[in-house]
Amino acid sequence: MQPAVELRGITKRFPGVLANDQTNLVVEKGEVHAVLGENGAGKSTLMHILYGSYQPDEGEIVLDGQQVRFASQREAIGHNIGMIHQDFMLVRPFTVVENVVLGLRDERGGILDLGKAAARIKELSDRHGLTVDPWARVEHLPVGVQQRVEIIKLLYRDARILILDEPTAVLTPQETGKLLATLRALTAEGRSVIIVTHKLHEIIEVADRITIMRDGRTVATLDKKATTEAELARMMVGRDVALKVRRTPLRQGNPILRVSDLYVADDRGASAVNGVDLSVHEGEIVGIAGVDGNGQSQLVEGLMGLRAIRQGSVEMAGVEITDAPLFDRSGKGLVYVPADRRGVGSVATLNIEDNAILGNQRQFSGAGSLLRDRAKSRSHAETLIDRFGVRTPDIRFPAGKLSGGNLQKVILGREIMRDPRVLIVEQPTRGLDVGAIEVIWSELLAAREQGKGILLISAELEEIRNLADRIFVMYGGRFMGELRSEDASDEVIGLMMAGVSAVGAREVGHVEYV
Amino acid sequence: MWNMFERRLAPTESPWAIAAMTFGSVVLAFLIGAVLFLPFVSNPIDAYVSLFEASLGSMRGLGITLNRAAPLIVIALGTCVAWRAGFGYLGFEGCLTIGAAASAWFALLALDGGLAFIPSILFFAVAICISFGAGGAWAGGVGLFRSRFGGNEVLISLMTNYVAAFIVQYLVSGPMRAPGSLPQTPRLPTETWLPGIIPETRAHAGILIALAATGLVWLLMSRMRLGYELIVTGLNPFAARYGGINVGRRYVLAAFLAGGLGALAGLIEVLGTQHRLLDGLSGGIGFIGIVVALLAKLNPLAVVPTAVLYAALSVGADAVQRSTGAPSSIIFILQSLIVLFVMASDFLRYWTIRLPFKSPGSESGKV
């Protein structure tokens, strides 16, 4: 049987970057094929070449034994290839059916028959167990359902080859399980699924075969049954990584940050944080697990004074700071590494030196804090890139051109060098590769050993379980319960992330909770 | 052939490439201008020579050019401050008008003898402060509106231009009108005129005010903490807020400074050139100044040569018409083409030329 897709010797150059270097990929009909690699390994470029977004400089694309060339995505779609991007390509104010027919041209006489389309969507969703109301507005649907809409969009176009870029990044473990089951069912119909990811354990669960990429090259294609997570990790980074970290025994000091009965609203005025109690002590890492969008961001913004607090109080070392502006909070030793590195944590077009003083610009000014003290900020930036191992030509390099890992080192380093008492870090390793994650984790643990209190908000269970001394799970703006890290199994946290209380989760997961 | 061009992932920031593109745009505009001259002159180069001789080649011409450039410079500086802080202010016509009215009012006070005792240097210092303050308050109001209520400053500031124009119309036809038929104020006392700076020319001290303002704006934007905060606010208001910067206050400050600078253009026009307040005084300078700032890529130091060249083209336009019979509109077409090409050349930054003999793999990797 001909393979569904064969990419032979694909090479793609961008100015200054060799994204794909003689890359090969063979995807059989009816298999789930995982493309695994660190960020920047060339996975996405390869997929965009298959999807017609880029044209390869060298190499050929063979579909079903026939060599093809795609000048555009439209041509790839015409060959029954579909792609779901990491950020969904849905028009949020449109209904499901409007989104599905968007871009199709098969309506006669320019008249749009949404009713007919909706009936077909219904039929597709029934057949594949993808429950979706065709008339619902996308903006009102949860993320997991939006992803179903994306899948239906592809099935509506009868995609035989489905490419999914990091499909599980935004899902709960339970939603992920459902998605993987759906993908299995699709391959049973002879469709091929390509999953691009850097999450090892999910791949092991669902993939039939795995292609590992590194530095733009194909390292190997392996049968799932014949490999292990450890082997895959090693092939991905080209060295042995131990993402298990060594935490020193907890030396909990005095409580510093104390939050009681906190209520915070989101942008639309709806309540996003509903009565949160929390304290962070010196020398401990408190983790807040949970799927994105359950009030974590609003909680942090409330704590930092970036969002008005409706009710409740925040204290730093016994001083109430509930309504203090951010500037006063950081003066009291409460600093923050935001989740959005490029959109909030840094100014992309400014250089590293200018970014290294952001938030602390008064300390780097002389003459009554009027004139900037360039010598001081320059040496500060030099120290920062030295101490945190930021890979950059110099401190005049624009921050936006740094890789995600190096930019995060600049931001985390900047905040740690302010010598805070409490450090709030939100999604500190999202989208980073294994090497950078190691650095960030060890810096956080080092800060903990220095007696700083750390509040870690993360959607990555592995991160929470490896770093946190105490774990809260947030769902719907509330804490579903508190766990000691040694009691927190993936299963229990996963259930709590889906809204089951700690008590309920304990019954299912058989753990003690504190 | 097509393989020679390749899209870049990010626009080039090489200063050489940008300078070459800007220069190329200007040359292209001059070439097209030359074609337009062909029906009128045998050699378009002659037309360009007489253009620059009239505006820059003689002391007299240079004086007029500098007088024309001075208000453009201060308005372009105001644009730099406001726009780099992310405040899309377009109300410089209004600021100019308000600044003109304020300085005329203050100078007429001197005519009435109320200020006859103060030395002239002090007069100019106070006039600058009053004019700056009036324009700053005028524009600052728009800034306050934006930071309090989140209004769209682009539209609001554009509308305020008309309000300012009608206020001056009211003043010169009513309270400040000189006896006589024309709607204008009396001529200002000669002691309140900006002094000449080059003998035998009309060049007045307006250009000195503009150069001093350039130095101060450069200091603000590149050397002061406030300038850093303004730039961060403009580039990324979310990062600014996260950095403890009060974004609303920075907008108000940027608007105040921009308005004050715009008002200085009015002062220069009234005390330097017109010597009275009259209706329709600005003549579009408030918008041309924005164009100058854009051509100078919002860089305060690049504003000065850009404004001088732009003013030289305007001054030389009449001379060309006199000496060659070619309509001066050719020069205005030329000016517009320069603006158009320089702005459009920005897209070239996204492309690179791949030379056949250069191995593509040899380029250095991205950090």
Image: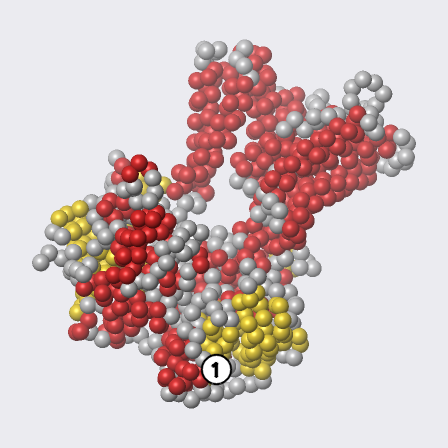
Tell me where residue B51 appears, x and y as whole percent: 55, 19
Taking B109 as reference, is A5 above or below it? below
Q: Residue at x 37, y 49 (%)?
A: A98
Q: Residue at x 63, y 71 (%)?
A: A311
Q: Which of these two is toward me, A51 or A507? A: A507
Q: Residue at x 64, y 44 (%)?
A: B217
Location of mark 1 (residue): A482
Which residue reaches farthest left?
Answer: A1
**Would you identify the image quadrant in which residue B282 lies?**
top right
Total marks shown come to: 1
- Relative to A464, A188 lies left or right: left
Q: Which of these two is toward me, B246 or B227? A: B246
- Mark yes or no: residue B232 visible: yes
**In the rendered view of the protein, which quadrant contains the N terminus of chain B?**
top left
**Which three-letter amino acid code belongs to the residue tagged 1?**
Glu
Q: Residue at x 40, y 38 (%)?
A: B348
